[in-house]
Image (cartoon, grey):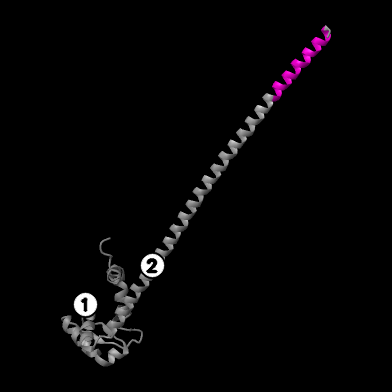
Amino acid sequence: MNGIEKITDRITQDTQAEIQALLTQAQQQAEQIVADCQAEAERIRTEILEKGQQELAAHRARLESMNQLDERKAVLAAKQAMVEEAFEAAIVRLCALPEEEMVPLLARLAAANSRSGDEEILLAPAQRAAYGQKVVDQANQLRQGGRLTLGPEDPEIQGGCILRQGAVDINCTFAMLTRQRRTELSGKVAEILYPPKQGL
């Protein structure tokens, strides 16, 4: 082997070694890039999964909260309906009082709410016919110097009375009196219907 061949062979060997080193380096870089991409993909996958789980938990919590709110609203509506029924039942019971209780009650209502002392007392037809004058007499006794008179029957009245003087009416019907005191009494009625649970 002459000198040129030796030099050529040497160059070939060096080139092959350099090529091999470059290939090894490129292979290592490619493996590192793949590993980095896999790690980044895993990080993104984990982040997406965690975010999805958090959103799912938040969505479930919102649904549960909404369900609880709807349930509370339904319970409250049912309780309010029962309180309303209790007030309606109270009016029915008041209207069904016997004469010996109804006459003094109507007389007290008329006397207590009379402004001038000479209004007309309007009653439901059945009450007016049965004991209207008794109510007027007792009301005038309760209101010293009263000149209350028996007015015409009023079919709109279910129970209680209306005091009328000219164009001015004072509504003392059981329905109106109950409505006026409803805000004040609703809480007490609810406590009777739904007593607080002991030990809570």
Sooner in the amino-acid sequence: mark 2 or mark 1: 2
> Where does residue 23 sit, x and y in percent of width and height?
71, 25
Report which quarter residue 31 is drawn in.
top right
Q: Residue furthest top?
A: 3
**Image quadrant occupied by the N terminus:** top right
Q: Residue furthest front?
A: 1
Query: Which range is magenta?
Result: 3-23
Local packing at callout 1 (Cα closer than 10 Å; few below 14, some 14-19, many 20+) is some
Answer whether residue 18 is magenta in the image: yes
Magenta-drawn stretch, dominant element (helix, strand or loop)? helix
Q: Which residue is labeled 1 in the image?
A: 112
Which residue is at 47% across, 58% downward?
63
Residue designated by label 2: 75
What's the residue type where badge 2 is placed? Val
Is 91 inside the magenta-drawn segment? no
**Which is in the foreground here, disc 2 or disc 1?**
2
Q: Within the image, what quadrant is residue 94 found in?
A: bottom left
Tag 2 and tag 1, C-beta contact below 8 Å: no
| Viewer-closest of 72 and 39 | 39
Along the line of sight, which residue is nearer the eye, 79 or 166? 79
Q: Position of residue 91 (x, y in %)?
A: 30, 80
Q: Residue at x 31, y 68 (%)?
A: 183
Q: Residue at x 72, y 18 (%)?
A: 18
Name the side, left or right, on which 62 lies relative to 112: right
